[in-house]
Amino acid sequence: MKVQQKIDHYFLLFFLVSQQLIAIACAINYFQSQQILLVIFFITVSSAILLALAFYCVFSYYRTAQWILLLTLIAGCFFLIVTSSDQVTSIWCIASAPVIGILLGHIRGTIILATIFTSAFIYLLADYSPTIKIKYDGILILRFLFSTALLSMFSIVINKYRINDLAQHSSVSSDKKILNRQDILTALLHRQCMEERLKLSYRKYESGLGNFCVILADLDNCKAINDHFGRETGDMALKKLGHLLRKELREEDMAGRWSGNQFIVVLPNVSQTVALPIAKRILFKANQIELLSKGDRVKITLSIGVCSSGNCTGLDDLLSLVENCVYQAKQMGRNMVIAA
């Protein structure tokens, strides 16, 4: 997305510079032909675009520069249609259509360009109106309307496909990012990602932005399950546990695969007294999982450790404490929760 923003900014800069050069050239042309009204108009346009360039180059106010340019072009189109029947001014109006269509986007660009075209169509063909003092050549009217419609449709269609391509590219990039940080088997975050989340959580805790708790769950008898029932059954147990954690945790909680048969959960803004019931609920739900393998029912149990960031002296100490809790649960018979 940042790359696309740079491209959009370069497009804007190109339009600003090109419109500035065109406005200056038109002002010089009409000065030589002594059409003072049009000289004043194009000097005004040039001044507005110069202001937009200042916002772009000096202050980096890209959105402000864009709207100054757009409002100048839109107002200029209406002004020239009403006040001038010169071919050069009609070309300037036509050339503004792609700029408006691209910078405003698909929906807003369509509305504005359709409004300009409809207004021009009504005005140019309303010969019966007593307010019209300028007589346009019939061929010029047809060329102007046809060219404006064609360029407007072209810019809108191009912009629509551009938006669709961006959305598709963004979706693919997002999917790749998700896949890159997920464990393939369990669809949870992988260890490296969880380590980064833990460091960030601990930095927030040190800054006084909230306590957090860590739950470390170890699948009991994982090697025995793989040896007796096959690795497919062991993998299915890990998948089921991954699904359980995704289902049971809040949106702001983070769960990941810590090692081969270990899972880690980070609970932001949760005290240890609140984290304990959550760990016990995970244990209870895990006990309800049953796998069928070779006609046998395989039960799942977990050894779980719980520790709060407030009970340690650092992140390494926190992880060491929660691992010791898991070790104690193993030594005491497995299938239980131990808190530091």
Image (spheres, rainbow, N blue to C red):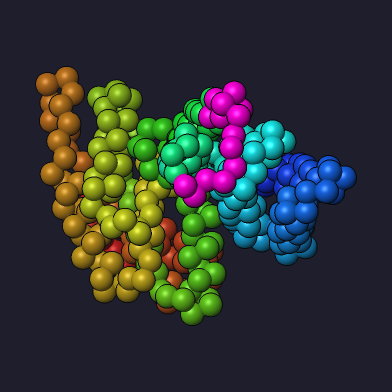
Residue located 37% across and 32% down the image: 185
Quadrant in the picture for residue 306: bottom left
- Marks counted in the figure total 0
Q: Of 193 and 128, which appears nearest the observer?
A: 128
- Give how far across and how far down residue 207 sits, in percent: 53, 77
Q: Which of these two is toward me, 113 or 105?
A: 113
Quick one: quadrant of the C terminus?
A: bottom left
Residue furthest toward the bottom?
A: 208
Q: Quadrant of the N terminus?
A: top right
Decide if residue 86 is on the left or right side of residue 327: right
Residue drawn at x 59%, y 42% as measured from the top left: 134
Q: Position of residue 195 (x, y in %)?
A: 52, 54
Above-or-below relation of 245 to 178: below
Bounds of the magenta span? 130-145
Task: Report if residue 178 is visible in the image.
Answer: no
Locate residue 59 relative to residue 309 in the image: left or right: right
Residue 247 in picture, x, y percent from top left = 23, 48
Q: Residue at x 25, y 59 (%)?
A: 279
Q: Quadrant of residue 337?
A: bottom left
Is 203 inside the magenta-drawn segment? no
Please tell me which residue lies in front, 308 or 69.
Answer: 69
Q: Magenta includes 138?
A: yes
54 sits to left or right of 110:
right
- Placement of 279 over or under 292, stated as above or below: below
Residue 123 against residue 152 in the figure, above or below = below
Q: Residue furthest top?
A: 294
Horizontal side, residue 16 vs residue 125: left or right: right
Residue 172: image x %, image y %?
A: 48, 32
Kindly identify the residue that appears in the image at 25 percent across and 37 percent down: 240
